Image: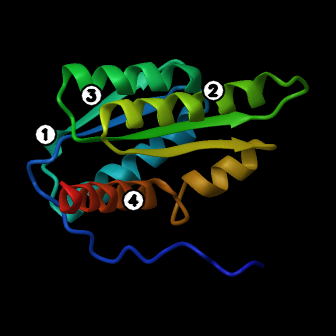
Amino acid sequence: MPKDVTPDLGRTPANPAWKIAIVRSLWHGECTAALEESAIAALVQAGIKRKNILCIDVPGSFEIPLVVQQAFEKSDVDGAIAFGVIVQGETHHAELVANQAAAGLMQVQLQQKKPVTFEILYVDHLKDAVARSIGKESKGRLAALTLLSSLATNRKIH
């Protein structure tokens, strides 16, 4: 088993006034709901007020970039987390969706100058997404801590 190379983000400083958007795909909803739940718990534990966490469901991962951009523009959020699960099937459709979701979110964060944590899992088998989203190995917590770390870094630069 490979060594865990996940950075230790420790106790990431959080401003309780930060507003966070979590945008999640409804495809493979058990996985994305678990990611969202663990992210919310980590954000609240870090000091973000629950009322400052805006959760938005979208049909699929392809729709996430537009809704993240709308959250930045209309809800005045400071950062966003994107959760989705894309499972490779017999066609190249999944790869196209994954690539465009990633490119769209990168474009949004560069245009808005606000961080977006990308946790859209593109996997060969659903069991791989389940392993990364449900239970103690959920990447939702890591996504939340990554966003808080990015927000804190951006505040230092400005």
Of badges 3 and 1, the one in the foreground is: 3
How many neighbours does mark 4 have within 10 angstroms: few (below 14), some (14-19), or many (20 or more)? many
> Which three-letter amino acid code belongs to the residue tagged 3?
Phe
Q: Quick one: SS at disc 1?
A: helix
Q: Which residue is mark 3?
A: 72
Left or right, 147 with respect to 65, comes to: left
Tell which circle, 2 or 1, labels the residue nearer the N-terminal end.
Answer: 1
Q: Is residue 120 above or below residue 55?
A: below
- Residue at figure coordinates x 61%, y 56% from the top left: 132
Q: Residue furthest right?
A: 90
> Which three-letter amino acid code belongs to the residue tagged 2?
Gln
- Residue at figure coordinates x 74%, y 25% from the top left: 96
Q: Position of residue 39 (x, y in %)?
A: 37, 52
Mark 1 and mark 3 in contact (Cβ < 8 Å)?
no
Q: Position of residue 6 (x, y in %)?
A: 54, 72
Q: Position of residue 90 (x, y in %)?
A: 91, 26
- Residue at figure coordinates x 32%, y 62% from the top left: 149
The residues tagged by marks 2 and 4 sit, at their Cα atoms, a distance apart of 22 Å
The residues tagged by marks 4 and 3 sit, at their Cα atoms, a distance apart of 18 Å
Task: Name the image quarter holding residue 10.
Answer: bottom left
Q: How is the image coloured?
A: rainbow
The residues tagged by marks 4 and 1 sit, at their Cα atoms, a distance apart of 20 Å
Between residue 52 and residue 29, name the one nearer to us.
Answer: 52
Q: Quick one: SS at disc 3?
A: helix
Q: Which residue is mark 2?
A: 100
Tell which circle, 2 or 3, labels the residue nearer the N-terminal end.
Answer: 3
Q: Which residue is mark 4?
A: 146
Q: Which residue is mark 1?
A: 51
Q: Quick one: SS at disc 2?
A: helix
